[in-house]
């Protein structure tokens, strides 16, 4: 994985090197760190550069995440403005938008297997997240999973590769990571799939809040509920009761079409 990313980084730097002189057309060089090129390079080069040499990469990446979150909320609020005020929680951004990506067209979008509205709970320090990815490995350069805390600080960032075929995948922060969700603290995760190594903003994304609690809540469906059923169904796909449980979960999440897709043993997140 690292060798793959390093080779992509080298190609990207060579591609952009003519633009990295003292004069950037239409861009104020006195504010270079906030330019599109700098953000682009941080998105890829920081994988290979020691942390001490990174220039505010975590802050910039987090700010992009906050922009994603804000834009997602605006889209969902517009879509749900006619819903009853008594609906449970605020909208999640569980379905990828198509407003700023160059990723291939798909019949179904990137979708997180979570309720349409928050809050969503977990009892785990490092919960498993489930997604439907409509893309295959050759269509996406790399996937990125990030967490931010209630102070808007990025507390985790990891990368992964997609499987050969579209399907439902699971992601979990590796045990070697320092991320541990603190009890009764609010966090927010972001999943991005980057489709074009030449464009740092060529991605699709989903995101949602997450909160760790002492025991599973009876308030709606939590992350662990999805994991429990998905894990059992993956291990015993021919079990009639588990198949019915999976179908019932799909109905409760209102994701019947998405959850008809195959469950794939993937993916491994790397720090």
Image: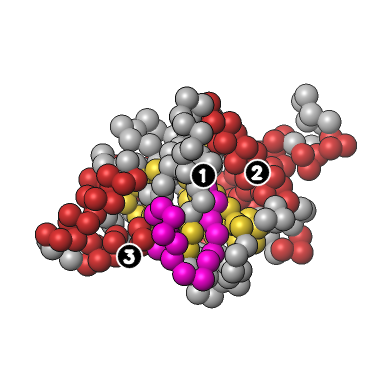
Q: CA distance from mark 3 to mark 1?
A: 23 Å
Circle 3 sits in a helix, a strand or a loop, which is it?
helix
Nearest the viewer among 171 and 210 is: 210
Residue pictured at 77% horizontal, 53% vertical: 55
Q: Is residue 171 visible?
A: no
Q: Which residues are magenta?
A: 206-224
For residue 222, which quarter of the picture?
Answer: bottom left
For residue 22, which quarter of the picture?
Answer: top right
Q: Which mark is residue 228?
A: 3
Estimate how packed mark 1 is, as few (under 14), some (14 to 19) or many (20 or more) residues with alpha carbons within 10 Å.
Answer: few
Report the side of 236 relative to 41 (left or right): left
| Badge nearest the viewer, 1 or 2 | 1
Residue pictured at 40% horizontal, 41% vertical: 110
Q: CA distance from mark 2 to mark 3?
A: 30 Å
Circle 2 sits in a helix, a strand or a loop, which is it?
helix
Residue pictured at 61% horizontal, 57% vertical: 186
Report x, y in % for residue 208.
Answer: 52, 48
Q: Check disc 1 and report the residue beneath it.
A: 89
Q: Check disc 2 and report the residue beneath it.
A: 66
Nearest the viewer among 23 and 81 is: 81
For residue 224, which quarter of the picture?
Answer: bottom left
Q: CA distance from mark 1 to mark 2?
A: 20 Å
> Is residue 219 part of the magenta span, yes or no?
yes
Q: Is residue 106 above or below residue 169?
A: above
Specify which label sits upstream in the sequence, 3 or 1: 1
Estimate how packed mark 3 is, as few (under 14), some (14 to 19) or many (20 or more) residues with alpha carbons within 10 Å.
Answer: few
Q: Is residue 59 visible?
A: yes
Q: Quadrant of the C terminus?
A: bottom right
Q: Is residue 266 above or below residue 31?
A: below
């Amino acid at each position: 994985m690292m060798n793959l990313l390093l080779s992509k980084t080298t190609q990207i730097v060579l591609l952009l090197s003519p633009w990295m002189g003292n004069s950037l057309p239409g861009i104020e060089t006195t504010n270079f760190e906030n330019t599109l090129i700098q953000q682009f390079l941080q998105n890829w080069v920081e994988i290979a550069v020691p942390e001490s040499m990174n220039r505010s990469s975590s802050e910039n990446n987090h700010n992009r995440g906050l922009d994603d979150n804000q834009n997602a909320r605006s889209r969902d609020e517009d879509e749900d403005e006619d819903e009853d005020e008594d609906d449970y929680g605020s909208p999640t951004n569980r379905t990828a938008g198509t407003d700023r990506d160059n990723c291939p067209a798909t019949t179904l979008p990137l979708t997180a297997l979570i309720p349409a509205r928050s809050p969503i709970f977990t009892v785990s320090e490092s919960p498993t997240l489930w997604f439907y990815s409509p893309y295959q490995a050759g269509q996406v350069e790399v996937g990125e999973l990030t967490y931010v805390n209630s102070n808007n600080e990025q507390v985790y960032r990891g990368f992964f590769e997609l499987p050969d075929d579209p399907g439902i995948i699971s992601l979990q922060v590796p045990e070697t990571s320092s991320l541990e969700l603190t009890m009764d603290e609010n966090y927010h995760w972001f999943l991005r799939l980057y489709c074009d190594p030449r464009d740092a903003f060529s991605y699709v994304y989903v995101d949602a809040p997450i909160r760790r609690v002492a025991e599973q809540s009876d308030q709606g469906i939590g992350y662990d509920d999805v994991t429990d059923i998905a894990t059992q169904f993956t291990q015993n796909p021919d079990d009639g009761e588990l198949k019915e449980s999976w179908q019932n979960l799909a109905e409760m999440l209102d994701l019947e079409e998405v959850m008809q897709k195959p469950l794939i043993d993937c993916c491994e997140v790397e720090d």
